[in-house]
Image: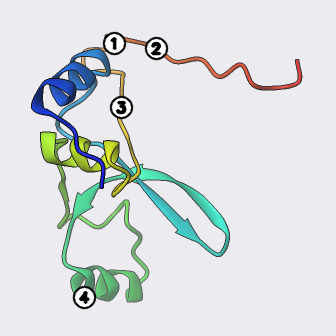
Amino acid sequence: MLSISEEQLSLYISLFRGRTDIYARRWEKHGRYGYTPAYSFEWNEYLRHKAKGGDFHSFENKEKIPLSRDIVKKHLIGAYFIGIYPLLEDNTSYFIAIDFDGKD
């Protein structure tokens, strides 16, 4: 199993800083995948809400899961797939990423 030192973890977190109040969690379903904000909620309560015609956006009893050192560490060793939100709430950012792998 991979191991990440506290020094390595601190370096990674210092380079890839973003919002700490929430992070994105990877999902997969029926061969599709994507990322969605990580929330904590009670599944049965949400399913009752959904059965009444509600959706996740309108479901109020959910809490953002903050990005912690433990979550980042699990991501780096391959236990979780996460994303961070680089755009801070004041519309600033510590870094940007650009995807250049297209044909043009």
Kindly report the distance in space between the C-alpha atoms of the residues bearing marks 1 and 2: 7 Å
Label 2 vs label 4, nearer the camera: 2
Quarter holding residue 61: bottom left
Which type of secondary structure does the marked residue at label 2 adopt?
loop
Extreme residue in the left direction: 6
Mark 3 packing: few (<14 Cα in 10 Å), some, or many (20+)? some
Mark 2 packing: few (<14 Cα in 10 Å), some, or many (20+)? few
Where residue 44 appears, x then y in whole percent?
Answer: 25, 88
Q: Are marks 3 and 1 in contact (CB under 8 Å)?
A: no
Kindly report the distance in space between the C-alpha atoms of the residues bearing marks 3 and 1: 9 Å
What amino acid is labelled 3 in the image? Tyr
Identify residue for label 3. 85
Q: Nearer the viewer, residue 69 or 5?
A: 5
- Does 46 appear above or below 33? below
Label 4 vs label 3, nearer the camera: 3
Q: Are marks 3 and 2 in contact (CB under 8 Å)?
A: no
Kindly report the distance in space between the C-alpha atoms of the residues bearing marks 2 and 4: 38 Å
Q: Quadrant of the C terminus?
A: top right
Identify residue for label 1. 93
Identify residue for label 2. 96
Q: Are marks 4 and 3 in contact (CB under 8 Å)?
A: no
